[in-house]
Each structure stands twice: as C-alpha cells, then as structure tokens.
Image (cartoon, rainbow, N blue to C red):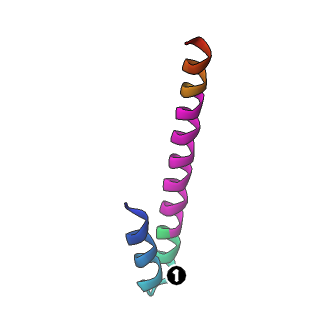
Amino acid sequence: MILPSYFFRLFTMKGKAENTVVFLSLLSLLALTLEEIKHQAVVALFFSNTA
C-alpha cells in the first residue's frame, strides 16, 4: 500500500509548497485508482454479459 506513506509525508512535511505537491500527487493517485476500478468494473460487466 502506498497511501499510508503518502499521508505520513503529508502530515510530517513543513512547507506549504511541499504539502501542495504531495496533496496533488495523492489526488492524481486517487483519480488513477478510481479510473482503474471503473475500467475493471466495465470489463467485468462486459464479460458477464457476453458469457
């Protein structure tokens, strides 16, 4: 799991700029994960419909 270390870094960092960078990378990681889940769900639905 990558997320806990991201949160740990987010809370231990001092600079606002660094916090923003970590926050944005966390958001993009979350967005990628959601896209992946959505993609897999679509594929699973497609295969269950064709099977």
Q: Residues within 10 Å of mark 1 (few under 14, many from 20)?
A: few
Q: Quadrant of residue 44?
A: top right
Residue extending farthest bottom: 14
Q: Quadrant of residue 27?
A: bottom right
Residue extending farthest top: 50
Please give the range of residues in magenta.
Answer: 23-42
Q: Can you identify the residue that label 1 sits on? A: 16
Residue name at image x 40 percent, y 77 percent: 9
Residue name at image x 55 percent, y 12 percent: 51
Residue name at image x 58 percent, y 33 percent: 41
Viewer-side residue, 20 vs 46 = 46
**Badge 1 element:** helix
Residue 16 position, x and y percent, is 52, 81
Tell me the quadrant of the picture where the N terminus can be found. bottom left
Residue 30 position, x and y percent, is 53, 55
Residue 21 lies within the magenta run: no
Residue 8 position, x and y percent, is 41, 78
Count all numbered tags in the image, as a single digit. Answer: 1
Residue 29 lies within the magenta run: yes
- Give the answer, above or below, for where 46 lies relative to 11: above
Viewer-side residue, 44 vs 19 = 44
In terms of secondary structure, what is the magenta stretch mainly?
Answer: helix
The three-letter code of the residue at mark 1 reads Lys
Q: In the rendered view, does 43 fall on the left or right side of 10?
A: right
Viewer-side residue, 51 vs 28 = 51
Residue name at image x 49 percent, y 76 percent: 19
